[in-house]
């Protein structure tokens, strides 16, 4: 049993959500998903009990239809983490913005999300702490982006490199996407999908578009 009073947690989450959506409300299904992600960030052992394959040392792959609330959920938890869990702070970036920046700046963008994605506290390579990042709306970006005539799948390259740092430095990655696992594999390749399964806890957010 969790040590947290979830009624109090949901009340506070509701107040955070209303900073973006005035009529923010969690139904029963929402609460179950928010509870799961809360346990994850607060490293509660209840998270591992939800699914025997879940691992607190992995990232999150949040899938679901357009407009169900995936991005908003990570925005809420980012604010919660910033207030209470400074050691787990993460940034959120739209994949469409990343590929747009690549078309202007080139391969340095990939480095910013992999080799250079570290806090360097003491100036020593051995003491580098990896930065966690959330890639919002994976699959919304152009599949191939050009830089001086060379076309590459930018997010494929970033995810593969972040996987390497997940193995060596426990670098965490969070993803929201409207794509199914089959669609992700078709777009980014079997190699990427295999690594996503290894480095992330999958969470499916059911429901229909709430923006209609």
Image: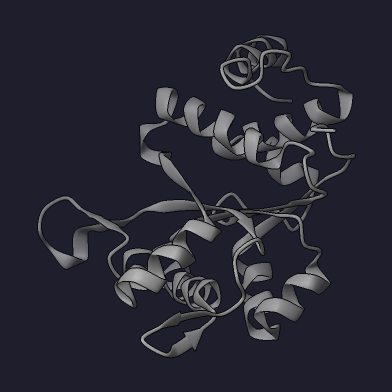
Residue at 65% across / 34% down in the picture? 73
Closer-to-camera residue (86/160): 160
Q: Residue at x 55, y 76 (%)?
A: 156
x%, y% of residue 132? 43, 52
Q: Position of residue 135 (x, y in %)?
A: 54, 55
Q: What residue sits 11% from the left and 53% below the top?
A: 122
Taking the spot 34% from the left edge, 76% from the top edge, the residue there is 106
Please identify the quadrant where the C terminus is shown.
Answer: top right
Q: Residue 165 location, x and y as percent?
A: 41, 70
Q: Is residue 74 above or below residue 60?
A: above
The furthest residue to the bottom: 150
Q: Nearer the viewer, residue 128 or 19?
A: 19
The image shows residue 102 at horizontal and vertical percentages of: 40, 70
The image quadrant of residue 181 is bottom right
Q: Is residue 47 left or right of residue 182?
A: left
Q: Is residue 42 visible?
A: no
The residue nearer to you, when weighing 130 against 115, is: 115
Number of numbered discs on residues: 0
Quadrant of the rendered image containing residue 88: top left
Q: Is residue 161 above or below residue 43?
A: below
Name of the residue lying farthest toward the left: 123
Residue in the foreground of this view, choosing between 32 and 75 = 75
- Image quarter of the N terminus: top right
Q: Is residue 165 above or below residue 176?
A: below
């Amino acid at each position: 049993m969790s040590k947290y009073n979830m009624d109090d947690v949901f009340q506070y989450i509701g107040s955070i959500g209303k900073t973006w959506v005035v009529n923010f409300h969690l139904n029963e299904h929402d609460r179950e998903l928010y509870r799961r992600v809360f346990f994850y960030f607060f490293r509660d052992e209840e998270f591992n009990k939800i699914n025997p394959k879940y691992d607190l040392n992995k990232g999150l792959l949040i899938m679901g239809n357009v407009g169900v609330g995936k991005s908003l959920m990570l925005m809420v938890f980012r604010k919660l983490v910033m207030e209470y869990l400074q050691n787990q702070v993460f940034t959120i970036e739209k994949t469409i913005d990343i590929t747009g920046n690549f078309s202007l700046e080139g391969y340095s963008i990939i480095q910013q999300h992999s080799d250079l994605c570290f806090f360097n506290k003491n100036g020593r390579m051995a003491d580098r702490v990896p930065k966690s990042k959330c890639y919002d709306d994976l699959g919304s970006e152009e599949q191939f982006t050009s830089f001086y005539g060379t076309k590459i799948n930018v997010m494929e390259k970033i995810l593969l490199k972040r996987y390497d740092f997940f193995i060596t430095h426990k670098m965490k990655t969070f993803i929201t996407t409207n794509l199914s696992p089959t669609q992700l594999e078709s777009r980014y390749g079997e190699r990427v999908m295999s690594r996503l399964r290894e480095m992330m806890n999958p969470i499916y957010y059911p429901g229909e578009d709430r923006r209609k």
